[in-house]
Image (tube, rainbow, N blue to C red):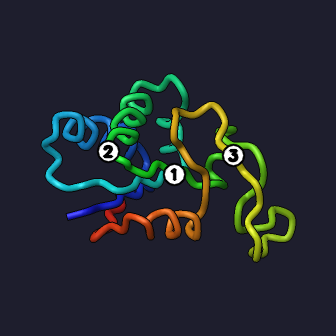
Amino acid sequence: MRVAYVFATPRAASYKLGQMILPQLEAGTHGVEVVGMFFFDDNVFVLRAGDPIGERLARIAQGKGILLMMCDMCALERHLAEGQPRWCDPVTGRGRTEPAEIRPVGTVAGVQVGCFPDLYAALAQNPPDQVITL
């Protein structure tokens, strides 16, 4: 089975990922193939360069081809990205028909920044059987 994780609740990345999922991935005992992880709110902080969980995760993700993506608005608000929201105009609050430019700043290797259309497009190449929100 192939899964993608969405880290949406407080401490989901620092606790559930860092204390449960990541150790299992490192040991090869997780039991499913993880194809992607999407981070919201303060969960993006584990993706900062130098963060112990983030550095371990980046190594595993690179070796296993796991997508690591953080929410564009969450990353911008927390100074982990530069640019503009990909699919929403920050002045009018209306959707865009063309994506804006944004890039991660100060994150572990391999992290992407995007919103749902970007997540769907990235996972289309390697689709999960289930999406699990934590």
Residue 69's label in the rendered image is 1
Q: The residue tagged with tag 2: helix, strand or loop?
A: helix
* Measured Cα–Cα span from mark 3 to mark 1: 11 Å
Q: How dense is the environment of label 3, judged by Cα within 10 Å: few (below 14), some, or many (20 and up)?
A: some
Q: Position of residue 88 (x, y in %)?
A: 74, 68
The relative height of residue 126 versus residue 46 in the rendered view (above or below) is below
Residue 39 vertical placement versus 13 (above, below): below
Comes first in the chain, label 2 or label 1: 2
Q: Are marks 2 and 3 in contact (CB under 8 Å)?
A: no
Amino acid at pointer 2? Lys
CB atoms of marks 2 and 1 within 8 Å: no
Please state if 21 lies on the left or on the right of 120 as rendered. Answer: left
Give the labeled residue for mark 2: 64
Q: Is residue 83 above or below residue 79?
A: below
Q: Which residue is mark 3?
A: 103
Binning the other alpha carbons within 10 Å of mark 2 as few (below 14), some (14 to 19) or many (20 upward) gives few
In the image, 87 versus 14, the foreground residue is 87
Of labels 2 and 3, earlier in sequence is: 2
Q: Residue at point 16% right, 40% down?
A: 28
Residue 23 makes an appearance in the image: yes
Residue 94 left/right relative to 43: right
Task: Find numbered disc 1 in the image and state the secondary structure of the residue it sits on.
Answer: strand
Residue occupying the far right of the picture? 91
User: Image quadrant of residue 115?
Assistant: bottom right
Q: CA distance from mark 2 to mark 3?
A: 23 Å
Foreground label between 2 and 1: 2
Q: Quadrant of the N terminus?
A: bottom left
Q: Residue at image x 52%, y 34%?
A: 109
Residue type at mark 3: give it: Arg
On the image, the x and y values in percent for residue 125 come to: 43, 66
Element at label 3: strand
